Amino acid sequence: MRLVLLGAPGAGKGTQCKNIVAEYGLLHLSSGDILRRHRADGTELGRKAQSYMDSGALVPDEIIIEMMTEAVNQAPSAGLILDGFPRTVNQAVELDKALTGNGYAIDAVLNLKIDDSIVAGRMTGRRSCPKCGAVYHLQNLKPKVEGLCDHDGAQLVQRPDDSPKVVANRLETYHRQTEPLVEYYRNNGTVLDIEADKDPDEVKSSVFRKLQTLVRM
Ligand code: AP5
């Protein structure tokens, strides 16, 4: 399977990707995680991306497309799930070209639907593990020991772009530049809509129900 996960910041893309990967054994390619790794490693790409990410703007297409098509081209044939890419119609067109070149296509796009008013609470309460990338929430998804990752005991951190001002910019960027992608993929008949404002297990069940219909096809 080749899947794309669409949704506003904080819709739960990363959270649901982990469930899908555990169930279906797909490779999880998160453009945000790859960019954050570049920043942590101090690469040139990471330095170029920094100001865009910190302000809540999109990193320019030419940087992202090269980074992500390279990752897609190296993916194993078992399949992958793309989280955070594509984010513009131009990125989607280039992704299609890369997949077609390898004899593949997108099987489905999971569209996590959520109201902007719910996003703010999710972002300010999010804490992540700098070591393994596990994601928690102060109220909704607590670690077993407060402040520490369940998997490796690392001290959890807050993402710098989760401040209220940057979250507002990220939402505006999403509606202006990324939401048109839903229509782009609807025209190909591959969109599976998911109500993402439910609790995490309910969202997981509805994601799995939709994916099962795909597997049976
Ligand atoms: P990126 O890292 O992709 O951020 P994002 O899309 O804004 O999404 P998030 O990671 O913030 O949210 P999520 O939907 O994964 O939610 P999560 O599961 O963590 O991108 C960051 C930046 O990189 C961008 O702003 C941009 O600058 C740049 N970038 C990346 N890709 C790019 C591209 N293709 N082109 C250009 N620039 C790019 O959940 C959030 C919180 O809510 C967690 O605490 C979680 O525990 C909790 N939660 C999850 N689900 C539920 C639920 N159902 N109920 C209650 N709480 C929940």
Image (cartoon, rainbow, N blue to C red):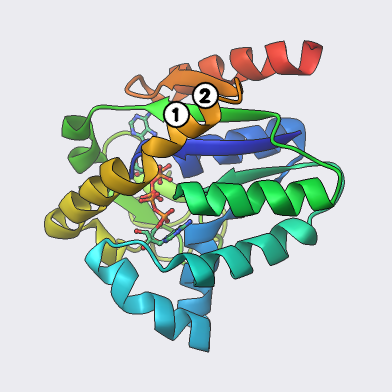
Q: Residue at x 57, y 53 (%)?
A: 151
Q: Residue at x 54, y 20 (%)?
A: 192
Image quarter for residue 11?
A: top left
Q: Residue at x 54, y 24 (%)?
A: 187
- SS for dot 2: helix
- SS for dot 1: helix
Q: Are marks 1 and 2 in contact (CB under 8 Å)?
A: yes
Spot occupied by residue 25 in the image (x, y as percentages of width and height): 77, 39
Q: Is residue 175 above or below residue 91?
A: above
Compared across the picture, whether 2 is left or right of 207 comes to right
Spot occupied by residue 168 in the image (x, y as percentages of width and height): 16, 50
In the picture, which quadrant includes the N terminus? Answer: top right
Amino acid type, label 1: Glu
Image quarter for residue 148?
A: bottom left
The label shown at residue 183 is: 1
Q: Visible in this render: residue 85? A: no
Classed neighbour count for the residue bearing mark 1: other residues with Cα under 10 Å, few (<14), some (14–19), many (≥20): few
The label shown at residue 129 is: none
Q: According to the image, label 2 marks what residue? A: 186
Classed neighbour count for the residue bearing mark 2: other residues with Cα under 10 Å, few (<14), some (14–19), many (≥20): few
Q: Does any atom of ligand 1 lie closer than 8 Å to the CB of label 2? A: no
Compared across the picture, whether 163 is left or right of 202 comes to left
Nearest to the observer: residue 137 or residue 75 = 75
Q: Residue at x 26, y 37 (%)?
A: 139
Spot occupied by residue 172 in the image (x, y as percentages of width and height): 21, 47
User: Residue most toward the left?
Assistant: 165
Q: Is residue 90 above or below residue 213?
A: below
Q: Does any atom of ligand 1 lie closer than 8 Å to the CB of label 1? A: no
Spot occupied by residue 145 in the image (x, y as percentages of width and height): 39, 49
Amino acid type, label 2: Arg
